[in-house]
Amino acid sequence: MINFQCDICYNYFSSKRSLRIHQRSQHTKTRQYTCKLCNEKFTQKSSQKRHIAFIHKNSKPYNCHLCGKKYSIKGSLETHLNNHAGEKPFSCLICGRRFADKRNFKRHGQQHVVVESLPCKMCGKVFPSDKKLRSHYRIHTKEKPFSCDICGREFARRTYLMSHLITHTKEKAFVCDICNRAFQRSFQLKAHFRNHTNEKPYVCHICNKGFTINAYLKLHLKSHTDEKPYICDICNKAFTTKSYVILHKRIHTGEKPFKCEICNQMFGRKGVLLAHLNTHTRPYACKICNTTFALKRYLENHLLKNKCEKHMNDLWSKSKSK
């Protein structure tokens, strides 16, 4: 049973000793980030944001004077106001692309920076920092130094562990105001929301293909290289990423780990399950004839192919009768 929660980052631990070790190793730095709602201090900005999201999730003191939407963080309101004004104040000096959000602007700038200095002695791939080289090297060594205190699962990166820890809480505090789907983390909601807006801010500099999140872009970029370090131990087929190997091996094993909680149907891929869930809710509706669809592309096809003939015919009949 999970009994001990860190009051700084809100992760859970199975024993008091594990909690003390965690706090000594992770939270001994100067607490320079302050919550403006309750003045609690944090060592990391991410911890401050997580605190606001979980503790003050119902406290949103920053109001948009144009549409009334409320935010818990002032910076989120400022970004939102830029969308109203159509302003994109952050301009890339290299390619000229403009952004309303400073964080997206910074992420975009990283695509133009290519610094190669530290080579991997196993495969020759080069990295801009020792930290990234060491992280990559664990692909070859299979080392997983970060373990979950709750279930014992091990991870190659600390960020993977932190993402995993949230799965033990089961809380989904971030809800899409369009389709009501809930998420455990704010970046998941932001990435999901781009499916509604069709925004793809992460662009491949080789083929110009766009992606909703940076992780998808990184996976795609590997398709332009010959590097395939992940091997299927059943048929020896090589892949660019570990996740592709896991998905591929389910062809051999027949494993279907993703279950629909509504009809109990099983799926081999999470993406297929998510698409299936829409068949129960049909969240995409035509504003002209009110027909609903399970997938966004079905709605788009409906609008393009049919042009809402029923509605157009009704309008034509009304105009003739006048």
Image (cartoon, helix red, strand yellow):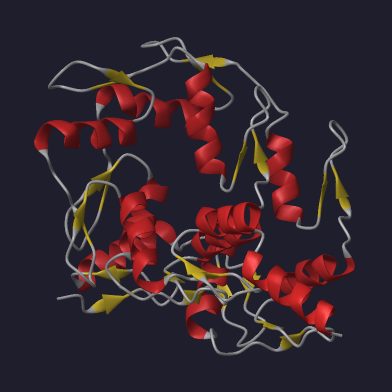
Left or right: 260 with respect to 73? Answer: left
Where residue 26 appears, as percent x and y from the top left, is 42, 59
Q: Nearer the viewer, residue 96 or 321?
A: 321
Residue depicted at 53% across the width and 72% down the height:
291
In the rendered view, tell whether residue 36 sits above or below residue 113: below
Residue depicted at 71% across the width and 40% down the height:
108
Where residue 265 appears, as percent x and y from the top left, is 18, 60
Q: Is residue 90 visible?
A: yes
Quadrant hosting residue 273: bottom left
In the rendered view, tell whether residue 112 sits above or below residue 256: above
Where residue 164 appears, as percent x and y from the top left, is 32, 57
Q: Is residue 44 visible?
A: no
Left or right: 229 with respect to 197? Answer: left
Left or right: 21 with respect to 225? Answer: left
Quick one: quadrant of the N terminus?
bottom left
Where residue 277 appears, as percent x and y from the top left, is 34, 65
Q: Nearer the viewer, residue 301 or 260?
A: 301
Q: Nearer the viewer, residue 229 or 7?
A: 229
Q: How many marks?
A: 0
In the rendered view, tell whether residue 215 sits above or below residue 240: below
